[in-house]
Amino acid sequence: MFKDKIVWITGASSGIGREMAIQFAEMGAHVAVSARRKERLEDLVKEIEQHGQKALAIPCDVTKEEEVEQAVKQIISYYGKLDVAVANAGFGVGGKIESLNADDWRRQLDVNVVGLAITIKHSLPFLRKSHGRVVLMGSVAAMISSPKGAPYGASKAAVRAIGQVVSMELHGSGVSCTTIHPGFIESEIGQVDNNGIYRPEWQDKRPKNLIWPANKAVKQMLKGIKNRKREIIITGHGKVLGFIGKHFPGMIHWATVKKLLPSPN
């Protein structure tokens, strides 16, 4: 299905993005990978090229529209077309509402929402020509809220809304839009601070028994992208929590508040 297709992935230096690049290449695609960490991108390109596929490293900060636009131009100049654009770049800002300032909120939305929208904007003219695929990386956090997670949850709820609108606007064009909502997936997101800086010394506090390996999760993601699904939820716990969050939000509120209440003396 993806043999000789051209796939562009943002946020490809680690986690889901990196694994996507590898698996797309294994399926015969040629990839362009973007992120801020140039050295990691170059290592990824070498790994993919060892398996006989073409790969192109394009360092890019998705919060800077001129860099996103230039990245697309480089892809078209090098490959001549674009078949799949995966807007995967993102991170999480955490903290109680009263502890966060305006810059924290802007930083979160700039990357996860504005950067994603701009990535798609500049990809679409070429995806229309190839009847390609738009892929947006959402999260189960779009459907289930948690204390100290308002900025991240708000950003992913916005991604879900963008995905729904893009699917409507592209109807009949031959271009599909797939929004992916992962649960806990093996990645570095738990070791990235509110400024988007990776802290390798930090311990990932996510529940280890619920974290899926990236390769297992990405296999399901690529299946959904291949079949042009509009929206998919990845991981078993993600599907359960997403269903409860969408249909029984009161249960989430009750369970969370009860957990946070102090024990009686």
Image (cartoon, rainbow, N blue to C red):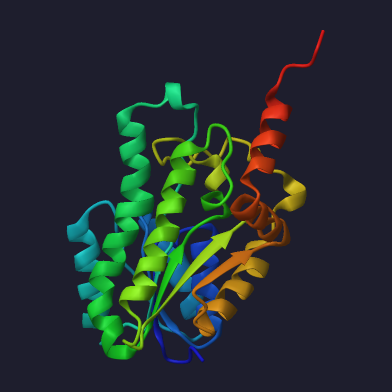
Question: Is residue 193 shown left or right of residue 125?
Answer: right
Across and down, in percent, residue 115 comes to 31, 55
Give 230 or 93, whichever is nearer the viewer. 230
Q: Residue at x 56, y 83 (%)?
A: 26
Give 77 or 171, whichever is nearer the viewer. 171
Question: Is residue 74 shown left or right of residue 183?
Answer: left
User: Is residue 81 visible in the rendered structure shown here?
Assistant: no
Residue extending farthest to the left is 66
Q: Residue at x 52, y 37 (%)?
A: 149
Across and down, in percent, residue 107 comes to 33, 40
Residue extending farthest to the right is 265
Give 85 or 151, whichever is nearer the viewer. 151
Across and down, in percent, residue 133 comes to 40, 80
User: Is residue 130 visible in the rendered structure shown here?
Assistant: yes
Across and down, in percent, residue 188 comes to 55, 49
Q: Residue at x 45, y 59 (%)?
A: 160
Q: Is residue 144 above or below residue 177?
A: above
Give 2 or 100, whichever is nearer the viewer. 100
Q: In the picture, residue 12 is in which quadrant? A: bottom left
Q: Residue at x 72, y 44 (%)?
A: 207
The C terminus sits in image quarter: top right
Q: In the picture, residue 122 is in which quadrant? A: bottom left
